[in-house]
Amino acid sequence: MTPKIVEIEIEDLAFDGKSVGRLDGKVVFCNGGLPGELVLAEIVKSKPRYCQAKVKEIVRKSDLRIAPRCAHFDICGGCTWQDLSYEQQLHYKKDQVLQCIARIGKLESVVVHDVVGSPDQYAYRNKMEFSFNVTEEGGFTLGLHERGRWDSIFDLDHCHLTSPVCNELVAWMREFVRAHDLTVYDVARHDGYMRFLVMREGQNTGQLLVNVVTNYGEFPFSDELVKGLTERFEQVVTIVHNQNGQKSNIATGEIENVLYGPGYVEEKLGRFVFRIRANSFFQTNSRQAERLYEIGFDVLKPTGNERLLDLYCGTGSIGILASERVQSVIGVELVADAVAAARENAAANGVTNAVFYEGDVKDLLNRLANDDTKFEAVIVDPPRAGLHPKALKRMLELAPSRLLYISCNPATFARDAGELVSAGYRLDEVRPVDMFPHTMHIELVGLLYRQ
């Protein structure tokens, strides 16, 4: 069948980074193009209310378009908006928050502040995952996914979202694998050894963790790996080997061995030092994370007497930072390794008024509601899916006077905020914070208080 190529005027940018136009009165979501551009696009999916299309050619360029810094921009799936000026990125991210609150949350009179831009627009990521894959010619690649492709990895020359040392380390590892004739994992056949190279870097400490993720089996050249990395890169303080034999293509391990160093890097947020291990969750933009949390505390305005409940606490960064501003903190997280890290970080910082529990948030809220336990303030920082309906119901039964909601997904935030407002809470303002320049992602902070 001959592809249907149509001419579309791009009008807007959607929440997921796609551009938006119209065809015969129907909304068309495109994988390229900027507002004000005229494009030729191929319709790849047609639904009753909308279409999806691939941009094939830009007939008329937008005045908003700039030259992307990255040579890989046209194929890489990491950045979607590097061809849009940063000021315009912030403009459209704010607009997305506004639309979500109005259309999904059905909330009026909520003030959405201008987006707090990242102090670092490049080299801001403290964690990067690079993938191995075989090529049809019998070689291999080490780099990032091609846009929209789970099974295609291009050889990375330079990523501008990470530091120069991480880029140099990718090139070094590529040569190490080639020199030692190590097999590379084939994502289609599920065989081969080398799977991922993951780096975690303390932006405020300069420390670097190298995590090599492979198929099952001890690393055959671990001594050579440690010697080569530590001699070449003085920033490397620890090297970890994770084994993952599962078909799911994720850069974590079932078996972890520390090949060198303590098994973690340290990062500073405020006066606190956090130990980050290979598989720990930690905000990816350290410097902006400090601003995110400070904005949250500024909105919450703790008096020092609160009992604070920290839900979806991860490795405890929010709760630990809040510990010096409140009477006590209880953190809850489902992932056992994250809870262990939170406890470790609290102990390492001498924090004695914060305790962390492993468990499902909705179950703990149910228990607290039955015990008639009260908290003056609750902080939630849920995953992209937002609050589980049962967790939201239990939250309402707990009835905290103030609920600080930190979200990485304006759509699910708006949904949950709408439910909370309907149940008697009030939301006056939202403060968006850009943690991920050149992508469509946006975080935000909102305080809901019981009327």
Image (cartoon, grey):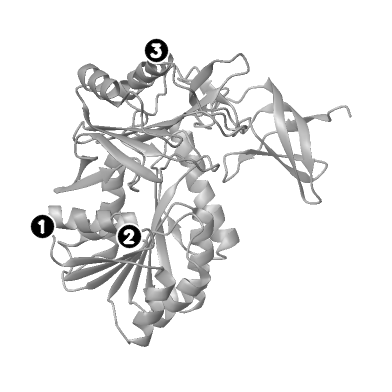
Helix, strand or loop status at disc 3: helix
Residue 448 pos. (x, y %): 39, 69
Q: Which of marks 2 and 1 is nearer the N terminus?
A: 2
The residue drawn where x is 30% and y is 46% is 289
The residue closer to the viewer here, 450 or 45, is 45
Residue 379 pos. (x, y %): 33, 65
Q: Mark 2 points at which residue?
A: 313
Name the side, left or right, on which 360 lies relative to 65.
left
Residue 264 pos. (x, y %): 24, 41
**Kind of residue sitting beneath label 2:** Cys
Q: Which label belongs to residue 390?
A: none
Task: Say above or below: 28 vs 390.
Answer: above
Residue 280 pos. (x, y %): 33, 47
The residues bearing labels 3 and 1 have C-alpha atoms spaced at a distance of 46 Å
Q: Name the residue under label 3.
A: 179
Q: Are marks 2 and 1 in contact (CB under 8 Å)?
A: no
The quadrant where residue 374 appears: bottom left
The residue drawn where x is 46% and y is 62% is 110
Task: Say above or below: 306 vs 280.
Answer: below
Of badges 3 and 1, the one in the foreground is: 3
Q: Do the residues labelled 3 and 2 touch (CB within 8 Å)?
A: no
The residue drawn where x is 63% and y is 18% is 136
The residues bearing labels 2 and 1 have C-alpha atoms spaced at a distance of 18 Å
Q: Quadrant of the C terminus?
A: bottom left
Helix, strand or loop status at disc 2: loop
Q: Which of marks 3 and 1 is nearer the N terminus?
A: 3
**Kind of residue sitting beneath label 3:** Ala
**Kind of residue sitting beneath label 1:** Gly
Q: Mark 1 points at which residue?
A: 350
Circle 1 packing at 10 Å, graded few (<14), some (14-19), many (20+), is: few
Name the side, left or right, on which 275 lies relative to 109.
left
Q: How many labels does the image show?
A: 3
